[in-house]
């Protein structure tokens, strides 16, 4: 299955905290040296919304970081 949005990581911004991988509901992100995206993305955009330095983006799209819930609330969902 092809990704709906081709996610990318700006390596100069990425602090390698792993929040994106921990929050991905379909476990599409693995942490190597930097986040790596698989092909199971469901476009929830949690990785972009909770990336502390805004390092994750869709190339060619203007994205403003938006959060409707807090990071700790998502982690307490049983993940």
Image (cartoon, helix red, strand yellow):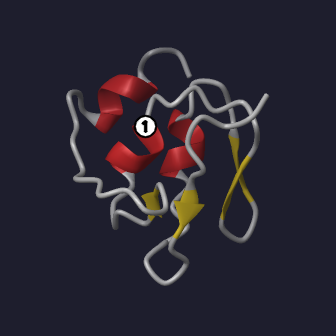
Which residue is depicted at the point 59% across and 34% down? 4
Between residues 1 and 16, which one lies in front from this camera angle? 1
Residue 57 percent across, percent down from the top left: 44, 58
Determine which residue is flagged by label 1.
45
Corner quadrant of residue 33: bottom right
Q: Is residue 68 above or below residue 53?
A: above
Residue 22 percent across, percent down from the top left: 56, 39
Between residues 29 and 59, which one lies in front from this camera angle? 59
* Residue lying at the far top of the rendered structure: 78
59 horizontally vs 3: left or right: left
* Residue lying at the far front of the rendered structure: 60
Which residue is depicted at the point 67% across and 37% down? 3
Quadrant into which the N terminus falls: top right
Q: Is residue 26 above or below residue 29?
A: above
4 horizontally vs 56: left or right: right
Q: Secondary structure at mark 1?
A: loop
Between residues 60 and 45, which one lies in front from this camera angle? 60
Which residue is depicted at the point 46% across and 28% down? 44
Q: Is residue 20 above or below residue 73?
A: below
Corner quadrant of residue 36: bottom right
For the image shown, how many numbered marks are present on the structure? 1
Which residue is depicted at the point 55% across and 66% down? 9
Quadrant into which the C terminus falls: top right
28 horizontally vs 9: left or right: right
Corner quadrant of residue 72: top left
Near mark 1 (Cα within 10 A), the count class, few <14, some 14-19 or many ≥20, is many
């Amino acid at each position: 299955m092809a990704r709906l949005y081709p996610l990318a990581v700006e390596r100069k911004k990425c602090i390698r905290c792993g929040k994106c991988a921990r929050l991905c509901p379909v476990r599409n992100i693995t942490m190597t040296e930097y986040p790596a995206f698989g092909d199971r993305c469901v476009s929830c955009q949690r990785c972009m919304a909770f990336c502390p330095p805004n390092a994750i983006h869709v190339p060619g799209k203007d994205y403003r970081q938006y959060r409707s819930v807090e990071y700790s609330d998502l982690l307490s969902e049983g993940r």
